Image: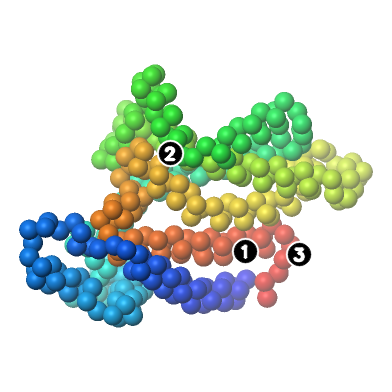
Amino acid sequence: MLTYIARRLLISIPTLIFISLVIFLLLNLAPNDPMAQVPLTVPPEVKQKMREALGLGQPLYVQFLKWLIQLFWIEPQVFIDYMFSTSFSEGKLRVISWQTRSPVMDIIVQRMPQTLWVVGMSYVVGILIAIPIGIYSAYKQYSVFDQVGTFVTMIGYSVPPFFTGVFVIVIFSVQLGWLPSIYDTTHTVVDWETFKTQLKQMVMPVMVLALQTTAMINRFMRATMLDNLNQDYVRTARAKGLSEWTVVMIHVLRNSMIPVITVIALNVPAIFGGAIITEQVFKVNGIGQQLIGAIYANDLPTVQTITFMFAVLIVLFNLLADIIYGILDPRIRYD
């Protein structure tokens, strides 16, 4: 297993480098100008000096190599310096945001906790709701519970998060006045009252994101459970006199979870993508709002770095799914 993990991690390095090249080329070939936000009263020669200071006058391959070195070499040194109080990165140029003139990773670290709170909570809630509903819907196929679950799932699939977000704001904030419509990122939890306030402002963003997660995982869970409930080993287990709980929750569920694990693992970057829209709707000062602001300001280093982080998430969770395969299915061996 350790050999397999090491081999996959080594293979992922050229994969991530290629992905970073594609991201860099797509963003740099797009029709954008970082000087578009500069006032028209600024003389052209000053704008030219600003371009040179940002490194825009250099060839594309030079810009890409610099960004690559800063991202893969200098930023890890900054992390090591922070953890162990060393000075490996002292005096070295990091990935700098064109919009704020500050290191991009520092901004990401500041905003990441807000995104992780909302995204992580919504994903956990979505999984905890979807798996039991999918199991029971498959076991009671075509029942009233199954029909209602299918109807709600179709709504979760078809309705985009920006519409769902506005809808719950109108209902729970404007009409009923139960929940705040804007997420206060400066709020800190110090006692029970502040904890309840934090819980209230998280309900709607988590609800909107969890709806999509629940819809997708529930349908996969139901489909795989139905497929396995009709297998020969299930009839054999029942013929041996095993209880229905043991047959469904141990034998059938274990085999059904294998394809669902892939969906859960590979949907993590997608839920971050959904958070981009949700953060805009509820004014959550997280990674998604930072990405939207960077796109509006033509801040290519920030957009490149955040997009590349999503690519890293896809590679890592793909590896995690393969590892969990070996745990759930004893037939799978990694030599």
Quadrant of residue 98 within the rendered picture = bottom left
Q: Earlier in the sequence, mark 1 or mark 2?
A: 2
Q: Nearer the viewer's eye, disc 3 or disc 2? A: 2
Determine the residue positioned at 31% across, 56% down: 295
Residue 42 is marked as none
Q: Which residue is mark 2?
A: 162
Q: Secondary structure at mark 2?
A: helix
Residue 322 is marked as 1
Please indicate whether residue 114 sits to the left or right of residue 146 in the image. Answer: left
Q: Which residue is mark 3?
A: 331
Q: Image quadrant for the C terminus?
A: bottom right
Q: CA distance from mark 1 to mark 2?
A: 33 Å
- Can I make out residue 205 in this image? yes
Tell me residue 81's x, y (percent): 27, 70
- Can I make out residue 76 in this image? no
Circle 1/circle 2 CB separation < 8 Å = no
Tell me residue 168's x, y (percent): 43, 29
